[in-house]
Image (tube, rainbow, N blue to C red):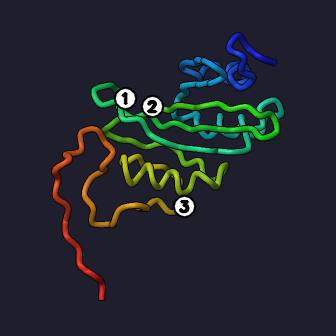
Amino acid sequence: MVDDFGSTALTRLLEHCTDAVQATHAQHGDATATIAAPRLVELLRFLRDDADCAFEMLTDLTVVDRLGEVPRFEVVYHLYSVAKNQRVRLKVRVPEGDPVVASATALYPSANWMEREAFDLYGIRFEGHPDLRRILLYEEFEGHPLRKDYPKTKRQPLIGPEG
């Protein structure tokens, strides 16, 4: 089943949970759905388990900082189906004041490090993550350096060798 965009995933998402899908688009085989944050895990599970979709791989998770927009952050999930050779992108918007979204690690173990990276560099918290802590920067590092308002000349605390 394929919709006007040529995407089975978007068709199935709209059939399954129209109320959770805020927007869709597809260009050049690139299908995208913006969804309601509280329904993220449900929709990820649906896309993974639905026979027409079979998105068994989370290939990437990243964050877009839309400084000046409300909500400010967009958490982006790139899914791939090996069996169907198709891709879909899910976007979830989260506010600057409380940037929290549910963890996808129970569904996609590959989300573990990707969520830690998003936490470290953007400050997005993933509720239910088994080990949410910095992965690239040291614990004393202050702030989140990929945020657009992070001061590029900010001095960080110096730490010495342990011993």
Q: What element carries label 2?
A: strand
35 left or right of 49?
left
- Res 109 quadrant in image: bottom right
The image shows residue 138, relative to residue 60, as above or below, that is: below
Up-down: is 158 above or below 144? below
Are the residues tagged 1 and 2 within 8 Å (C-beta)?
yes
**Gap between marks 1 and 2 measured at Cα:** 6 Å
Which residue is farthest bottom? 163
Crowd rating for badge 1 (residues with CA inside 10 Å; few <14, some 14–19, many 20+)? some
- As helix, strand or loop, the secondary structure at mark 3 comes to loop
* Disc nearer the start of the sequence (2/3): 2
Percent across and percent down for residue 129 are 53, 56
**Residue underneath mark 1:** 71
Ranked by sequence position, the earlier of labels 1 and 2 is: 1
Label 3 is placed on what type of residue?
Pro
Tell me residue 68's x, y (percent): 27, 26
Residue 93 image label: 2
Q: Where is residue 38 in the image (x, y as percent from the top left)?
A: 53, 35
Picture quadrant where residue 89 is located = top right
Q: Which of 55 and 82 is in front in this view?
A: 82
- Locate the N terminus and report the quarter of the image it occupies: top right
- Residue 130 image label: 3
The foreground one among 80 and 52 is: 80
Rendered residue at 25%/57% (across/down): 142
